[in-house]
Amino acid sequence: MPNPEPEQSPDQSSPPDIASAELDAEFVRLFSQNQQRIYLYLMSLVSDANIADDVFQETMLVLWREFHNYQPGTNFMAWACTVAFNQVRAWRKRQQRDRLQFSDEFLAAVAEELDAQADVLDQRHTLLSDCLAQLPQHHRQLVAYRYTAGHAIDQIAQQTQRSIDAVYRLLSRIRKTLHECVSRKLAAEDAQ
């Protein structure tokens, strides 16, 4: 069968596609910002980490392959969740032999509720970031050790030269301070 496109000699090759590189970079940026939320969304729909991992990989591939259909400036997370939801439905069709399956209607209701809660969670995340920024530097560092880096309490105690009990007490006070700060900010926004 003849090749429909003529072969190009090395001196006739086209220049690198700059628009494609920019599109790739934009995908990586948006996906990196939202990948954890996409995964958590999938976990809420399938409730099994192994299945969520598999569906997440499939979703990531579809997002990459279909990114040219994404409308820049629109809500990437909403688009990605639509793709993820469709991947869960496709996975469910492949798993028809399993007895315990949620109906499409139930999954749609869960997805709708998650959509409704996304704005609330985004708002609380923003408020939490604001409250974290108000903490003293050594408290922010302690929070980062524990919750960002995932260090164990004994490691943090060793790094900060505190007793394990002192680290537990300080983290408890920091969590209480952050909770009160976020609650105050939410109440202030609700009053407006």
Image (cartoon, rainbow, N blue to C red):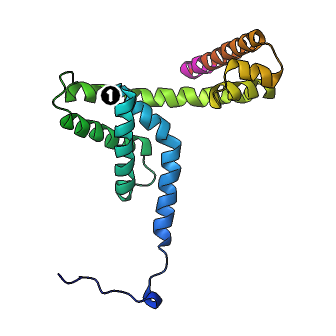
Residue 138 in view of the camera: yes
Judged left or right of residue 10, residue 4 is left
Quarter of the image holding residue 52?
A: top left
Residue drawn at point x = 64 percent, y = 31 percent = 148
Q: Position of residue 188 (x, y in %)?
A: 61, 19
Amino acid type shown at disc 1: Val
> Looking at the picture, does residue 188 appear above or below residue 26?
above
Is 112 in front, or is 2? 2
> Looking at the picture, does residue 21 appear above or below residue 42?
below
Kindly state the secondary structure of the residue where label 1 is placed: helix
Q: Is residue 187 magenta?
A: yes
Is 166 in front, or is 126? 166
Residue drawn at point x = 66 percent, y = 16 percent = 175
Is 70 in front, or is 40? 40
Q: Which residues are magenta?
A: 185-191
Q: Position of residue 105 (x, y in %)?
A: 21, 27
Q: Is residue 9 magenta?
A: no
Judged left or right of residue 171, residue 119 is left
Q: Position of residue 190 (x, y in %)?
A: 54, 20
Badge 1 local density, few (<14 within 10 Å), some, or many (20+)?
Answer: some
Outermost residue to the right: 161
- Count of labels in the image: 1
Quarter of the picture holding the N terminus: bottom left
Which residue is identified by label 1?
46
Is 186 in front, or is 128? 128
Residue drawn at point x = 36 percent, y = 26 percent = 48
Q: Position of residue 35 (x, y in %)?
A: 47, 41
> Looking at the picture, does residue 56 appear above or below residue 100?
below
